[in-house]
Amino acid sequence: MPPLKTLAISVGDLNGVGFEIILKAHVRIRTLCRPLYCIDRLMAERAAALLGNTLPDDFECHSVGESFEIRPGCVDATSGHYSYNSFKEAVELAKTGTADAVVTLPIHKEAWMRAGIAYKGHTDALRDFFSQDAIMMLGCEQLYVALFTEHIPLREVADRLDAESLIAFLIRFYRSTKAQKAGVLGLNPHAGDHGVLGDEEGFIEEAIKEANRRIGHEVFEGPIVPDIAFTPRFRERYGFIVAMYHDQGLGPLKALYFDESINVSLGLPIVRTSVDHGTAFDIAYQNRASVTSYLNAVKAATTLQRYQENE
């Protein structure tokens, strides 16, 4: 059998549930890959002790070069800075080929802000690290949702929508996923009702037609009325949906598949997957966190291929 892939694991905010998930899942993860945890051994031992555990003998650490006091459930600049450095180390391991992929545990956006980190999250940072327009996609085997816009105020979404930007997004999405069919949501209620409730659907329809023309076959369909797109009939038709903004796609997705879903960064020269949940400070170090999303993220990281710009 071929050797197991090495995955660089970014430990996330140590004041949250990330390390509990890592420790709970370690034995199962070792059957899927060789995990290389981006955390100093001293910090790993402290986190394990808070959970009433010790580190397994085969727990491999990659130094981040810092130590601090873990404060379960607290928003803390020091913890935010450590989670960012853990993430940077994991990405560097993938860039240099030491690791085959990166899997990230949840960070806390306010902790990053308090630490003076300019990025709103992992995907923003990855865009800057690689100077490439990464796509945020979340979901599971039953349904994946890609976001055309992400962490921006709702009032700015319509201003970001134009045909050329969406064409480039759709083609990049296709090259990353090789999706056979994908539904594209309209922006407005009732997908605009032919201009009665807005005219942005004209841009969306134009982008769909042109993206399909450039790809060479009919991959994208829409604009689909957003309030019916997640019903059983449409979920049977589309394994992938492109949403125009964050909550349009992720509200329904999390209602349907919260525990199973993962986060995937598409369009990058490295593979990066993540859990699709937050730091859960309210249950930190209480041994109550689910490992399902993490296990799915690891499985996906062992099978996904790097994006090639000229495919």
Image: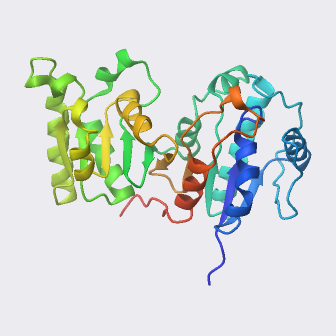
Rendered position, 301 above or below 137: below
Give 53 or 277, whichever is nearer the viewer: 53
Q: How many marks?
A: 0
Q: Residue furthest top?
A: 155
Q: Quadrant of residue 165?
A: top left
Q: Residue at x 22, y 34 (%)?
A: 228
Q: Quadrant of residue 242?
A: top left
Q: Residue at x 21, y 22 (%)?
A: 189
Q: Residue at x 73, y 24 (%)?
A: 115
Q: Residue 277, how many percent across, how many down? A: 57, 37
Residue 238 in sight in this render: yes
Give 2 or 226, whichever is nearer the viewer: 226
Q: Residue 158, how many percent across, how many down? A: 29, 22
Q: Residue 43, how many percent across, how many down? A: 87, 42
Q: Is residue 13 left or right of residue 122?
A: right
- Placement of the N terminus among the 4 image quadrants: bottom right
Q: Residue 267, how many percent across, how many down? A: 44, 51
Q: Is residue 62 left or right of residue 130?
A: right
